Image (cartoon, helix red, strand yellow):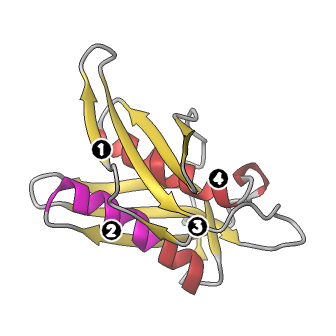
Amino acid sequence: MAEPIESGTDLSLPEVKYEYLDHTADVQLHSWGQDLKEAFENVGMAMFNYMTDIETVDMDLQTHVEAQGDDMEGLLFHFLDEWLFVFSADDFFIPRKIVITEFDAENFRIKSIGYGEPFDISKHPQGTEVKAITYSAMKIHHNVEENRHELFVIIDI
């Protein structure tokens, strides 16, 4: 459940590092970052920005999400699925910013905090509903030439 944001929390917004790629009947999220942690944060924001214009979201509340998987693809799937669940079950909470506070690549665990507010149709434009996260064509790639980590995830819309 969403709670007040702790005093002194850094709410500065990072550079947008994601895009949407065409896919038959669905959409593919493509995010990147200097490390996997940043790429995961960006793919979470890509999903929510597809659902509404996140620039209209105020950072008034925070909510915590934890995820774990059996491998890195499973961790990516569960990370997005847990955030989608928060939207669906927790007063339609929309984060404007997601920060991963713990990223355990060896045990495939993540702890994260989202800063945002509940979705309000009178304030937030309604984008496309995300029905589910899929494993289809999921890819985690270290782009050595550009020195960045990239994620590709198809979401069912």
Q: Nearer the viewer, residue 116 or 130?
A: 130
Per the picture, the main secondary structure of the magenta-coloured stretch is helix
Magenta residue check for 75? yes
Instruction: Say if 68 sits above or below 45 in the image.
Output: below
Q: Position of residue 15 (x, y in %)?
A: 57, 32
The residue where tag 4 is placed is: 49
Magenta segment boundaries in residue numbering:
71-83
For label 2, the SS is helix
Contact flag, marks 3 and 1 (Cβ < 8 Å): no
Secondary structure state at the residue bearing disc 1? strand
Residue pointed to by mark 1: 139
Q: Is residue 22 left or right of residue 141?
A: right
User: Residue 130, which numbered label?
Assistant: 3
Identify which residue, 153 or 109, lies in the foreground: 153
| Three-letter amino acid code at the position of disc 4 | Asn
Question: Considering the numbered disc 3 on the image, is that residue within a helix, a strand or a loop?
Answer: loop
Asked if residue 103 is among those painted magenta in the image, a careful observer would answer: no
For label 2, the crowd category at 10 Å Cα-Cα, with few meaning under 14, some 14 to 19 and many 20 or more, is many
